[in-house]
Amino acid sequence: MIGHSPTMPANPEISVVVPVRNEEESVEELARQLQAVLPEDHEILFVDDGSTDNTWQRLTALHAPGRIRLVKFRAHAGKSAALMAGFARCTAPVVFTMDGDLQDDPAEIPAFRAKLAEGYDLVSGWKKVRRDPVHKVVASRLFNCVMRCATGLGLHDMNCGFKCYRAEVVKSLKIYGDQHRFIPVFAAHQGYRVTEIVVRHRARRYGRSKYGLSRLAKGFVDLGTVLLRTRFHDRPAHAFGYLALCCGLGGAGLLGLALSPWLHPAASWAAAAVAVALGSGALALLALGWVAECMLHGAAGPSALLAPAIEDTRD
């Protein structure tokens, strides 16, 4: 990061954080659309995530003290890093995030604020009708279906960039890599009230999407980290235990198949070898889980772990 513009309104009512990368055609129009719907006391923070086109030049022309603030990364750091940089600098009690490609409609902002006023802490957009290529729509729906099943959070569009937060939510976040798509999961885990509203999704007018099908594979890999940070944060041995159970059951099934008299000898040896590998993997996973559990809870020493509960009768 090479710098930011520090000037800001004394008490902004809304902060809007917009991470951008190579969006030179859209940033000016997005700024105009935002200022048309935002209240008088607002701030817009554009975070340039290492753009290689003229995005930064367009942004510097837009810079307006007390209204439009700028942050620039020297190199591409990813959307999570860009959001964290914006969150660290926003000062309003209500924070919006949105993408810089004009597919999110700023006219939806009042609807988000109305939902937030009902007592929620995070309101996420749901692009119920997507204006994207078919392969992106299918991948998104598959990803969100798996996320709902794995996390128990019933949002239809976990990765929608158009969101509204109370400031305490964004200040509590610690995300990195590609974990921005799991922000609602982290917020819900901390006890914040999370919901969603249907938003209009506009077709891309300029450039092309920065994300491909590889994002789907990365998302499923990141899911393991997210579950360890939330659902299994205090009992990692359970997470590794579930994986070990799957490997063990698979190994047992293959071993039974290998012992079948009707199976070809070569196939039997192959099945037996895979069964042994799965069994060994199950033991390794169990060991990793136990080590993680001891590292997490054993810092106070074995005596503290084994000590009986002490009743404290002090007022």
Image (cartoon, grey):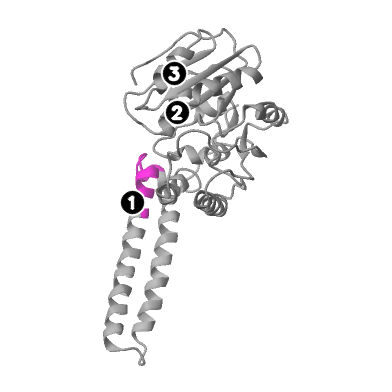
Say which label, 1 or 3, has the lower sequence index: 3
**At which x and y percent is residue 267?**
30, 83
The C terminus appears in which quarter of the rendering? top right
Residue in the image at 40% along x and 44% along y: 297
The reply to whether discs 3 and 2 touch (Cβ–Cβ < 8 Å) is no
**Is 293 a magenta residue?**
yes
For disc 1, the marked residue is 291
Alpha-carbon neighbours of circle 3 within 10 Å: few (<14), some, or many (≥20)? some
Q: Which residues are magenta?
A: 289-304
Residue 183, x across and y down, in percent = 52, 37
Q: Quadrant of the N terminus?
A: top left
Q: For this rendering, which residue is in front, 21 or 312?
A: 21
**Residue 93 visible here:** no
| CB within 8 Å, label 1 to label 3 | no
The amino acid beneath tag 2 is Glu
The residue wearing badge 3 is 58
Is residue 54 positioned above or below 189 on the image?
above
Image side of residue 267 versus residue 28, left or right: left
Name the amino acid type tagged 1. Answer: Val
244 to 104, vertically: above or below: below
